[in-house]
Image (cartoon, helix red, strand yellow):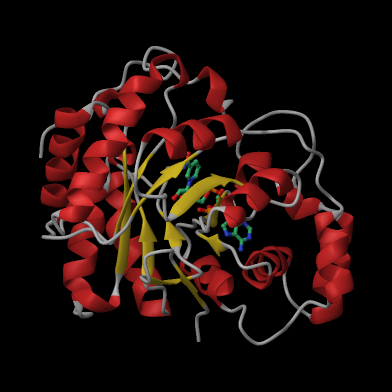
């Protein structure tokens, strides 16, 4: 039985979802089908992942009632601006084959052109008012981006999806999200970014403390990390292309970490970001990627 989080507009979301970043097109349908068959009911995709079409096909093929699946996608930065973002929503919903999105978020802040980010968010507010989306939010917003957004727009984001795993848990940002009633959603919840990209700092999957706690519970390190997110009230969206791992990552509802174990995992935070630095995001720095029409 999945846990849920309630967004600041009353919409209820399964806490544990399935992410599809870096899943090649030809594998996306099978991966999402496998996730849905396992019991996941939250799917996180993005225009920039270029696999929304396959996600939509898998959802239709599953035979599961549309209202039982929570679908989240993201507007890419090259589509920021009021009219552009309205159009980006059209592109996304058409590719997904949906009438309404459950959650639409801005993929990144665009700090050097924050006026465009604000215009994009105002488009999300319009889409929310028009019932095209059930909730709106942001991703990779650091405190300064969040504060500026809150000062200049009306609807408080429902979600801030950020890099969050035991080696980079951003406690201050989590607290700021919570203070504003914004749900923190963890990307790379298993610390994928600590092992699928080269770089210093080690892999969360190999961490001795997490390994010890896993052994004590006869669970895997991945399961312990997911349990840590859920018990601390976050949403988490692990990705895998392998059916056995998809199942493993969902099998986290039959054990509980103690307060001391949660604190030990909190203590692993190195405070070093492994993903892109949000302050430096520009359309050019991300390769000038454009999102194709539907
Ligand atoms: P995850 O923490 O989900 O890790 C994924 C990696 O872990 C993959 O290499 C996967 O390999 C492997 N893996 C999955 N399950 C297990 C397991 N049980 N044991 C061992 N290895 C495992 O990282 P992601 O970065 O993929 O993040 C998850 C989701 O977050 C993305 O799919 C996307 O939806 C979102 N995201 C959002 C970002 C943003 O900017 N907003 C940025 C990055 C991600 P394999 O597939 O081979 O199993």
Q: Is residue 136 visible?
A: yes
Left or right: 168 with respect to 137? right
Q: Which sits in the foreground, 122 or 174?
A: 122
- At 60% from the left and 39% from the top, the residue drawn is 196
Q: In which quarter of the image is residue 103?
A: bottom left
13 relative to 3, above or below: above
Residue 18 point in image, percent of width and height: 44, 62
Left or right: 115 with respect to 171? left
Q: Which sits in the foreground, 22 or 19?
A: 19
- At 26% from the left and 62% from the top, the residue drawn is 134
160 relative to 222, above or below: above
Left or right: 260 with respect to 227? right
76 relative to 27, above or below: above
Left or right: 254 with respect to 80? right
Count the labels in the image. 0
Q: Which sits in the foreground, 275 or 99?
A: 99
Q: Is residue 191 visible?
A: no
Residue 192 point in image, percent of width and height: 61, 47
- At 52% from the left and 79% from the top, the residue drawn is 3
Residue 289 point in image, percent of width and height: 30, 22
Q: Which sits in the foreground, 153 or 168?
A: 153
Q: In which quarter of the image is residue 153?
A: top left
Residue 114 point in image, percent of width and height: 40, 21
Instruction: Pick the quarter of the image with the C terminus.
Output: top left
Q: Quadrant of residue 197?
A: top right
């Amino acid at each position: 039985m999945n846990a849920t989080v309630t967004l600041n507009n009353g919409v209820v979301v399964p806490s544990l979802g399935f992410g599809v970043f870096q899943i090649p097109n030809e594998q996306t349908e099978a991966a999402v089908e496998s996730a849905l068959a396992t019991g996941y009911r939250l799917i996180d995709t993005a225009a920039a992942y270029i696999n929304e079409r396959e996600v939509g096909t898998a959802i239709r093929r599953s035979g599961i009632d549309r209202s039982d699946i929570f679908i989240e996608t993201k507007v890419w930065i090259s589509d920021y601006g009021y009219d552009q973002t309205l159009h980006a929503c059209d592109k996304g919903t058409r590719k997904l084959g949906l009438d309404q999105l459950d959650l639409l978020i801005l993929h990144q802040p665009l700090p050097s052109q924050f006026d465009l980010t604000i215009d994009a968010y105002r488009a999300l507010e319009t889409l929310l008012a028009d019932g095209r989306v059930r909730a709106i939010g942001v991703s990779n917003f650091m405190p300064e981006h969040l504060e500026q957004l809150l000062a200049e727009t009306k609807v408080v984001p429902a979600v801030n999806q950020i890099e969050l795993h035991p080696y980079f848990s951003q406690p201050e940002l989590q607290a700021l999200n919570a203070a504003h009633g914004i749900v923190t959603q963890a990307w790379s919840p298993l610390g994928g970014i600590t092992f699928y990209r080269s770089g210093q700092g080690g892999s969360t999957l190999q961490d001795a403390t997490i390994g010890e706690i896993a052994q004590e519970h006869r669970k895997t390190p991945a399961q312990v990390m997911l349990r840590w997110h859920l018990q601390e009230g976050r949403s988490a969206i692990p990705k895998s292309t392998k059916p056995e791992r998809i199942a493993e990552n969902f099998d986290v509802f039959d054990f509980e970490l103690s307060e001391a174990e949660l604190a030990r995992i909190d203590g692993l935070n190195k405070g070093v970001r492994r993903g892109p630095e949000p302050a430096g995001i520009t359309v050019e720095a991300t390769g000038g990627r454009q999102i194709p029409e539907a």
